[in-house]
Image: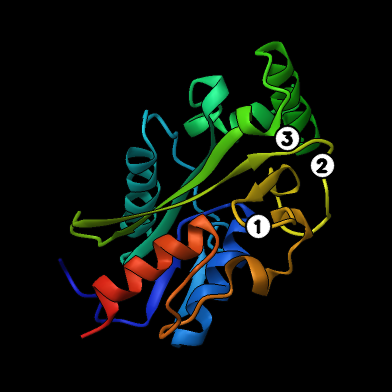
């Protein structure tokens, strides 16, 4: 494993919600970070069929464009009753005809698919959020970190916090959805904490323990 020896990196994302969560996580560690969106980098085509492949595509694109290490995230909602969908295509389910993303529409699409599959009882609506972080260097070296959190898809959506599918995902052991949790509750992790809740925070915990700690 290669250690990260700089505090200046690029957050390889154009997703405002994702950028904010990553900044919340890396900020306390003293990083200076600009996002691919801030730098007006072109979004690469995510042609991979796994979270790992797509995370690497994004991180390498930003590392090559900036000449700095870049940290990306590829994440999605994996629903058992839908055979793993939407999975790596989680963002695609929200795409509209004009090229924007409508997650209210996407959540309704998920609910319609679950109803069609006969998955109406909580026990048949198990799912997990997956996040794969990729740290890439300009020389092409990459390190990957995967985090997952189990839960249930609920309906109707609850809460206005977070972003994406957060209002319909209730993590296992909790009575509230990600959409009802504050940012601190959802992904507030810092070195020394034994537990991290969100999929992204869990992946970040592994990244810190692998690439930052001596």
Q: Nearer the viewer, residue 176 or 10?
A: 176
Number of the label disc, if any, that sits on residue 100: 3
User: Does 194 sit left or right of 167 as displayed?
Assistant: left
Distance from label 1 to label 3 (Cα)?
13 Å
* Vertical position of residue 66 compared to residue 75: above or below: below
* Display colour scheme: rainbow
* Vertical position of residue 192 compared to residue 172: above or below: below
Image quarter hosting the N terminus? bottom left
- Based on the displayed image, in which of its 4 quarters is residue 70 positioned? bottom left
Q: Residue furthest left?
A: 1
* Vertical position of residue 56 compared to residue 103: above or below: below
Residue 96, horizontal then vertical, whole percent: 74, 26
Q: Callout 1 environment at 10 Å: few (<14), some (14 to 19), or many (20+)? A: few
Residue pictured at 67% horizontal, 58% vertical:
174
- Give the residue at mark 1: 16
Q: Nearer the viewer, mark 2 or mark 3?
A: 2
Residue pictured at 25% horizontal, 62% vertical:
137
Residue 162, horizontal then vertical, whole percent: 72, 57
- Give the residue at mark 2: 157
Q: Is residue 137 visible?
A: yes
Q: Nearer the viewer, residue 140 or 52?
A: 52
Q: Callout 2 environment at 10 Å: few (<14), some (14 to 19), or many (20+)? A: some
* Mark earlier in primary sequence (1, 2): 1
Q: Nearer the viewer, residue 193 or 213?
A: 193
Image quarter hosting the C terminus? bottom left
- Based on the displayed image, in which of its 4 quarters is residue 90 positioned? top right
* Mark earlier in primary sequence (1, 3): 1
Residue 18, horizontal then vertical, whole percent: 59, 57
């Amino acid at each position: 494993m290669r250690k990260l020896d700089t505090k200046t990196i690029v957050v390889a994302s154009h997703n405002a919600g994702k950028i904010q969560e990553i900044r919340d996580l890396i900020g306390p560690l003293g990083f200076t970070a600009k996002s691919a969106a801030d730098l007006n980098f072109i979004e690469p085509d995510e042609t991979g069929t796994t979270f790992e492949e797509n995370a690497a595509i994004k991180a390498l694109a930003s590392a090559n464009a900036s000449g700095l290490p870049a940290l990306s995230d590829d994440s999605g909602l994996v629903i058992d009753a839908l055979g793993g969908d939407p999975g790596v295509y989680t963002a695609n389910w929200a795409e509209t005809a004009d090229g924007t993303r409508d997650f209210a529409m996407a959540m309704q699409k998920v609910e319609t698919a679950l109803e069609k599959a006969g998955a109406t009882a909580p026990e048949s609506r198990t799912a997990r959020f997956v996040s794969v972080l990729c740290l890439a260097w300009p020389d092409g070296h990459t390190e990957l970190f995967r985090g997952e959190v189990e839960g249930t898809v609920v309906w109707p959506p609850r809460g206005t916090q977070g972003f994406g599918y957060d209002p319909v995902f209730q993590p296992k052991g909790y009575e509230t959805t990600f959409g009802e949790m504050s940012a601190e509750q959802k992904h507030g992790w810092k070195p020394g904490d034994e537990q991290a809740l969100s999929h992204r925070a869990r992946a970040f915990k592994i990244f810190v323990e692998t690439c930052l700690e001596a």
